[in-house]
Image (tube, grey):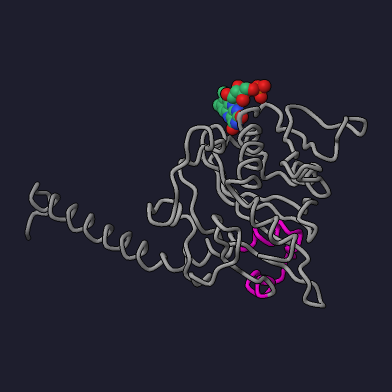
Amino acid sequence: MANNDTIQKTVTVTLLLCIACSIVVSASAVLLRPAQVANKQLDFNKNILAAAGEYKEGVPVSKQFSQVDVRIVDLRTGQFTDEFDPDTFDQRSASKDPQLSESLSKDEDIASIKRREDYAEIYLFKDEQGNLSKVVLPIRGYGLWSTLYGFLALESDLQTIVGISYYEHGETPGLGGEVDNPEWRAHWPGKQLYDASGKVALEVIKGQVYPGTPDAEYKIDGLSGATLTTKGIDNMIHFWLGEQGYGEFIQNLKAGDA
Ligand SMILES: Cc1cc2nc3c(=O)[nH]c(=O)nc-3n(C[C@H](O)[C@H](O)[C@H](O)COP(=O)(O)O)c2cc1C
């Protein structure tokens, strides 16, 4: 009978096992990729609905999202554009493409994003009569450890906040990661964005907002023990709702001229 206890046989069996396992792992990665991409898109859409206060547990996200009108805005002109198909437009890739984005100077780049894309994908919610009820705008900016990616939703007055949600960040759970906490997110609805002169007046402050706090309607509680993430959120709101971001588009939409 052949001897199985040879170095040659041990090495052969080990190698065959390694090859078999790597084929299984690679095949799984390739086969599961489409499902991962689809789930990521569903999570993205779920966060848009959540920012707008429209997400309903138990109803398929795809069904809920079908009511949303997805449009592309040219941030340089503040006008809607049909230059890109919203089904295929990738804003994150556009933000890295020198043909589709602009480099920001140090003074302009308060959200620490380096480049601002020329086009943004935005989400419009309509009421039963077909009138605009809410607008959801993508926002992003650096916190302490990471760039936070999320959405800010506004009422049709383009002044009152409906909500905020983040779908990707690398902040510390329990500290900066509290951006995902529904209790903190509940501070946002009803807050006001612009002052009478049209400047972004909304602030995420260090500490808490009390009923007697002056200008409480413009102030949001900071995250405790996470001053740097808090500052990052405040910065990204000022950037994206200001003139480098959606400022011009919001003016045009208010005037019925977007
Ligand atoms: C392990 C660890 C994780 C931290 N994560 C965060 C974070 O996600 N966001 C943040 O702003 N600060 C975070 N901090 C705290 C900051 O390092 C910093 O101390 C803090 O933001 C300073 O302000 P504060 O203590 O007044 O909030 C972390 C600290 C440690 C030690």
Residue drawn where x is 65% and y is 27% of the image: 227
Is residue 55 shown in magenta? yes
Give whichever of 205, 118 is nearer the camera: 118
Check the image and report above or below for 151 versus 67.
Answer: above
Quarter of the N terminus within the rendering: bottom left
How far from the left and from the top, in percent, is residue 99? 38, 56
Check the image and report above or below for 81 versus 157.
Answer: below
Check the image and report above or below for 22 versus 238.
Answer: below
- In this rendering, would 41 be left or right of 188? left
Give whichever of 175, 202 is nearer the camera: 202
Quarter of the C terminus within the rendering: bottom right
Quadrant in the picture for residue 138: bottom right
Give whichever of 73, 90 is nearer the camera: 73
Check the image and report above or below for 128 versus 118.
Answer: below
- In this rendering, would 1 be left or right of 47? left
Residue drawn where x is 49% and y is 55% of the image: 118
Stretch of the chain drawn in magenta: 45-66
